Image (cartoon, rainbow, N blue to C red):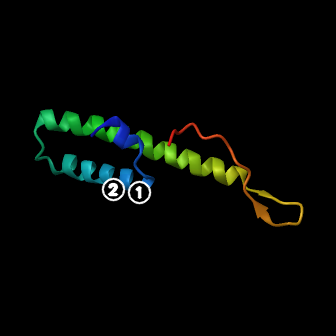
Amino acid sequence: MDSDKTAKLSFEAALAKLEGIVDAMESGEVPLAELLAKYEEGSKLLKVCEGRLKEAELKIEKLKKGKDGSAAFEPFASSRSE
């Protein structure tokens, strides 16, 4: 999978692809050359998932109480380019 396309995947899409790769690898029916390619793709997808989770964590940390007691988001600079 192209790195650009991988980087643009949503968390859910990246996780689904990663789960499919893990299932294929665990089946034991994948040839070694393909297994290595799947491992590399899985590593990229794992980084995407970790990045999305970190972004969500940062958004939650930025959530703060407003002066009137209501919750409000404080924008933060994301390292992810859209």
Q: Quadrant of residue 70?
A: bottom right
Q: Which residue is mark 2?
A: 16
* Camera-side residue of 55 and 33: 55
Q: Relative to residue 66, is residue 32 drawn left or right?
A: left
Residue 60 numbered tag: none
Residue 21 at what x, y percent from top left? Answer: 25, 48
| Place of residue 75 in the rendered image (x, y in percent of width and height, measured from the top left) | 70, 48
- Classify 10 Å Cα crowding around label 1: few (below 14), some (14-19), many (20 and above): few
Count the marks.
2
The residue positioned 60% from the left and 41% from the top of the image is: 78
Amino acid on which disc 1 is placed: Glu
Question: Helix or strand or loop: what does disc 1 sit on?
Answer: helix
> Residue 12 got which mark?
1
Is disc 1 in contact with disc 2, using a CB cutoff of under 8 Å? yes
Taking depth in this image into account, of 31 and 10 the one nearest to the observer is 10
Q: Residue at x 27, y 40 (%)?
A: 1
61 relative to 71, above or below:
above
Above or below, 44 against 20 in this view is: above
Q: Residue furthest right?
A: 67
Considering only vertical position in the picture, is 3 above or below 18? Answer: above
Q: Position of residue 3 (x, y in %)?
A: 34, 36
Q: Residue at x 84, y 60 (%)?
A: 66
